[in-house]
Image (cartoon, rainbow, N blue to C red):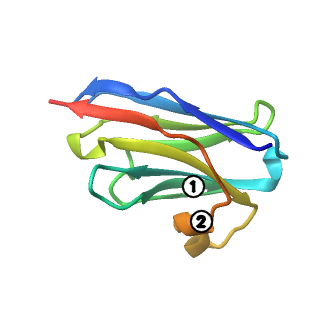
């Protein structure tokens, strides 16, 4: 069965960095588009970044600070985060959907087929 497992979350000070990793199994990695989403307490799940080679999209709130990339050989997706702010605090989820280049689809969490369990990122001042 398909499994997405996130890791790399943790507690970091404002301005710090983290790298999230999503390890995928049970699917043909290169045939999927990948996204990172996040959900803070009391808020809806929101788009963070997506990669559908070679296209990447980012939420305005993370542009210039976060970088998404994928490794088809390792079946992994990464989210490098720098300049972290308190408002970045959330549970971060990795998600997959069949390969597409449609921007609106890539930004919409409702169109993704597979999800990981999430990893907590807490940014403290």
Q: What distance separates the C-alpha of mark 2 from that of mark 1? A: 7 Å
Circle 2 residues within 10 Å: few <14, some 14–19, many ≥20: many
- Asked if residue 53 shows in the view, the reply is no
Vertical arrangement, residue 80 with respect to residue 108, above or below: above
Quarter of the figure that contains the C terminus: top left
Query: Which secondary structure, mark 2?
Result: helix
Circle 1 residues within 10 Å: few <14, some 14–19, many ≥20: many
Disc assigned to residue 106? 2
Specify which label sits upstream in the sequence, 2 or 1: 1
Tags 2 and 1 in contact by the CB under 8 Å rule? yes
Residue in front for this viewpoint, 105 or 58: 105
* Residue matched to label 1: 50
Residue extending farthest right: 28
Residue at the image position 54 percent from the left and 40 percent from the top: 117
Question: Is 88 left or right of 120, judged from the image as shown?
Answer: left
Question: Is 4 left or right of 75, judged from the image as shown?
Answer: left
Residue 112 location, x and y as percent?
63, 61
- Asked if residue 115 shows in the view, the reply is yes
Residue extending farthest left: 125
Residue at the image position 32 percent from the left and 56 percent from the top: 61
Query: Which secondary structure, mark 1?
Result: strand
Vertical arrangement, residue 92 with respect to residue 8, above or below: below
């Amino acid at each position: 069965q398909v499994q997405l497992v996130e890791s790399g979350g943790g507690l970091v000070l404002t301005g710090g960095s983290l790298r999230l990793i999503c390890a995928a199994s049970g699917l043909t990695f290169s045939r999927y588009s990948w996204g990172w989403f996040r959900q803070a307490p009391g808020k809806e799940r929101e788009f963070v970044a997506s990669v559908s080679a070679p296209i990447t999209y980012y939420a305005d709130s993370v542009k210039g600070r976060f970088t998404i990339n994928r490794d088809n050989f390792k079946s992994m997706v990464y989210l490098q985060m720098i300049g972290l702010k308190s408002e970045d605090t959330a549970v971060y989820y990795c998600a997959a959907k069949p390969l597409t280049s449609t921007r609106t689809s890539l930004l919409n969490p409702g169109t993704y087929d597979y999800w990981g369990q999430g990893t907590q990122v807490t940014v403290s001042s």
